[in-house]
Image (tube, rainbow, N blue to C red):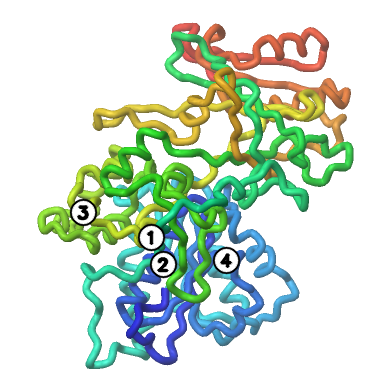
Amino acid sequence: MQGSPGRTPMPNTRLLVLFGSQTGTAQDVSERLSREAWRRELGCRVQALDSYPVVNLINEPLVIFVCATTGQGEPPDNMKNFWRFIFRRNLPSTSLCQMDFAVLGLGDSSYAKFNFVAKKLHRRLLQLGGSALLPVCLGDDQHELGPDATIDPWLHDLWEKVLGPHPLPLDLSLTPPGVPWPSKFTLKFLQEVPSTCSEELCVTGTDPQGPPSELQPFLAPMVTNQRVTGPSHFQDVRLIEFDITGSGVSFPRALGVPHSFVAGDVVLIQPENTASHVQQFCQVLGLDPDQHFTLQPRELGVLCPARLPQPCSIQRLVSQYLDIASVPRRSFFELLACLSCHELEREKLLELSSAQGQEDLCEYCTRPRRTVLEVLCDFPHTAGAIPPDYLLDLIPLIRPRAFSIASSLLAHPSRLQILVAVVQYQTRLKEPRRGLCSNWLASLDPGQGPVRVPLWVRPGGLTFPKTPDTPVIVVGPGTGVAPFRAAIQERVAQGEAGNVLFFGCRQRDQDFYWEAEWTELQTRGCLTLVTAFSREQQRQVHAG
């Protein structure tokens, strides 16, 4: 975001914000930085790290890195190429001597490698000659007010450092918080429905030039959707099978197919919002779901969402792209307040988006897991006046969900299976909280007609011995056994019998996943199985 028409960024100040984000939080913080830069008349660019030509870093005078840490100290997917490059041993120690930088980290202090990526990147940038404006910021999800508790004071210090040599001119002042920033896109509504509907062309069965991907997922037919927990069990768990014939990943890697999957890999699935939620959203915002539009970026260098067809209907935008079932972040309330014309609602929204109102925001939204749609229903006058141009600024895009692949192509050719625990829980809100993807998958019934689910695969974090004759011991309690089933199937198909599985669940007759399969493998001498059922005796026993 480089300022609205008529506003000129301050001379000699080119701020670049680069982010690595897995769940969207780092991207959200980066866009907050861009908004704060706009309010200070600063030119600012925001990019994902892997979309930025990293060799250009040597020419950047001022860069803010916003990086999440995932898993056990791993960088997010959209910065892994940058991560490999920046740690090359042959990079000169003066590579970044012209660059001032700051690193803002996002992590969870309950993990041993808390903010590992941010800390390591900060050290590496210093090694390459960069000058740190500030110590690394360590945002913590475990803080009662979330990462903002650390980010707010850090940003205050950052702007003092950035503006120190370049204070605001006397004839300019800081744009107040209640003034909306320019939308990234304009929605141009079409008077007629397009004769050729591009929406159906956006996702095809497979890409002949390569494997399925986020930009072009494979529309996999769902073969079965079976509940595998007992009818009286509190948890609904599904074993779902897809037919991946023709996907480009339907043959074992052992047969020389480079894009296939092996045990430990994951499948990503792109879910949709429920029809009732889509209808409610359109009603609250006064949108016609059948209206078609085209999307145009306001500024050069800003790209439209890659998966969004052009033209597109409001119905498709809301059902497949806007994450109206997510819990909104502070930035949502900030923009909503800027767009509100209702005095009482605007006052409350400004309070919830302020630094002083974060405890109230946590109590209202974060703790009870109130959704975007529910918040909009609580502020109906504001919701009904939201300009459509701001929809993509206000609401994040639905992110794909990753599931461990629970089957091997050697045992189930042209098939892919997943084990899905359907997420549903109660907070103080009347309506139960429901996981978007798991509930969407559970609602699909291939027995009632053809069902296709957009998916693609990627390497996972679990790896198994490359030499099959190496004995393997795995501990997989509950649904965590899914990737180990794929591994055991793969190893048994290769003739390996050195497989030991420790499995635990609550009750043998309620959630003992694949009991018959494990028993049959035991009988054949291919598996040693050790079980623990925590609710079948007075003293609880656990597998792990």
Q: Identify residue type, mark 1.
A: Asp
The residue under the point 27% across, 92% down is 169
Residue 447: percent from left, percent from top:
58, 18
Residue 174: percent from left, percent from top:
25, 80
Q: Identify residue type, mark 2.
A: Lys
Q: CA distance from mark 3 to mark 2?
A: 20 Å
Q: Name which of mark 3 and mark 1 comes first in the sequence.
A: 3
The residue under the point 26% across, 45% down is 284
Q: Name which of mark 3 and mark 2 comes first in the sequence.
A: 2
Q: For this rendering, which residue is in front, 325 or 454?
A: 454
Q: For this rendering, which residue is in front, 78 or 345?
A: 345
Q: Name which of mark 1 and mark 4 comes first in the sequence.
A: 4
Q: Which disc is residue 184 wearing?
A: 2
Q: Which residue is mark 3?
A: 382
In the rendered image, the vertical position of residue 79 relative to residue 440, given as above or below: below
Q: Which residue is mark 1?
A: 393
Q: Identify residue type, mark 3.
A: Thr
Q: CA distance from mark 3 to mark 1?
A: 15 Å
Q: Is residue 234 left or right of residue 367?
A: right
Residue 527 seen in this snapshot: yes
Q: Is residue 534 left or right of residue 244?
A: left
Q: Name which of mark 1 and mark 2 comes first in the sequence.
A: 2
Q: Is residue 353 left or right of residue 521?
A: left
Q: Which residue is mark 4?
A: 49
Q: Is residue 395 left or right of residue 211?
A: left
